[in-house]
Amino acid sequence: MAIYNPKSLKAEEFINDGEILATLEYAEQNKNNIELIDAILEKARPKKNGNGVTCAGLTHREASVLLACDIPEKIEEIYKIAEEIKLAFYGNRIVMFAPLYLSNYCVNGCVYCPYHLKNKHIARKKLTQDEVKAEVIALQDMGHKRLAIEAGEDPKNNPIEYILECIKTIYSVHHKNGDIRRVNVNIAATTVENYRKLKEAGIGTYILFQETYHKESYLKLHPTGPKHDYDYHTEAMDRAMEGGIDDVGLGVLFGLELYKYEFAGLIMHAEHLEAVHGVGPHTISVPRIKKADDIDPTAFDNSISDEIFAKITACIRLAVPYTGMIISTRETEATRTKLLRLGISQVSGGSRTSVGGYTQDERPHDTEQFDVSDQRTLDEVVAWLMENGHIPSFCTACYREGRTGDRFMSLCKNGQILNCCHPNALMTLTEYLVDYASDKTKEIGYKLIEEELEKIPNEKVKAIAIDNIENIKNSNRRDFRF
């Protein structure tokens, strides 16, 4: 029997089934232990020191106790601390991005995804480089600066060479004042050599959802294809780190397995990365299974309510305080509004989950990976965020200034990241307002920027930011950054 060891490079040891089951039992036994819960909450609370704010984070066992707790006033305290942590490290900034689907050819048999090999009626499509360029121009015309590229796993149709060529094309497109400045990559688990190639291509974050950490369920849900190999998939982040990619993104597909098991596994994976590589996940995503072509989400009996979903999000924020947290257009406007207060720091806007979808006037459904619940335009999402007191940020400065991996985390952990991120967000928002926004969004945005500039504590930084913003407005100059 495998023994739990967060420093091991073997999946069965750092995501250890016995340890997860013991954790769930411990959480169930202590879910009403007020003294323990209060001690965990106190540990999680952000604390001021001479250098700014620090946050201890929580172990998978401590976080699981909070997730199991059903005492209403304690749940409210969890939510309050989650909001405090998010504001302490990320402020009221929300990073904007969009997915770009390159190909839906796939050799896997994943039973929750319409791209599975046995689906013979879905339209299969792979973008040519001219089509990639057209999609990028459409995204730039919306105002996007950051993409997450997606592709099915198919060595013949979507080899690493194709992905690399697409990345090169994306970065090469300069349309009007538009540029894609950061390409994140969400493709299947691969080799150290291929991760090294992705790093050399200038990617931002490598994202790979585990889908489920429950090995028995994983094997059933992935009955055929290379993704069936649980260990190879689960150990992918270690290979990515070995290949030089120091920003990686985790996530599970909530609804496939019991959520408490998934939550414990997710936090253990974050602990493993910290223990082995000295840096935890750059992002954690929280998708829920949604309807798609031949996929009925009601066929999976582990769906979670909006209340549980909110609790999961808040508990992740307490456990892994420095990670970016992502919520996509899978979720409705109402759900996204609530979760923004509980730790979310990145959202997609104007998303289309079909191959070639951005160049179409109407949102196509024939190649969608999942149904989009929030179908608002990027402009509508930007206005909504600002009306709710958030700063939509199109910033990609940290990645391009080399503030990645442990360098990003060290800045984040001592609170210094706010000295560059806040003004960078305001400058990139100004770019969006000048180049792409509707009159209504401009009116809301310029007022917000004026108010937020006054909150910059360093007078020199404030003066530079004000000057740069005036240049963006009046001289057509772009891409200022701290």
Image (cartoon, rainbow, N blue to C red):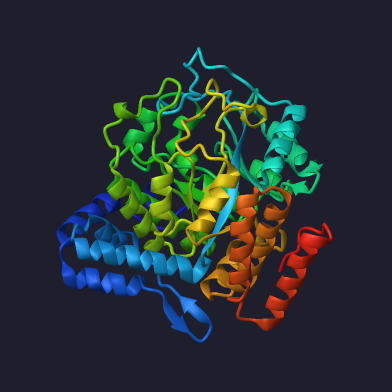
Residue 314 appears left or right of 10: left
The location of residue 185, given as percent across then percent down, is: 61, 43
The location of residue 461, given as percent across then percent down, is: 69, 77
Residue appearing at x 54%, y 74% in the figure? 415
Residue 264 appears left or right of 239: left
Residue appearing at x 42%, y 41% in the figure? 332
- Compare residues 393 and 71 and report the one nearer the observer: 393
- Compare residues 127 and 455 and report the one nearer the observer: 455
Can you see residue 345? no
The location of residue 373, given as percent across then percent down, is: 44, 36
Q: Determine whether 262 is above or below 105 in the image.
A: below
Q: Determine whether 15 is above or below 454 in the image.
A: above
Can you see residue 60? yes
The location of residue 384, given as percent across then percent down, is: 51, 51
Q: Determine whether 107 is above or below 277 in the image.
A: above
Query: Number of marks in the image?
Result: 0
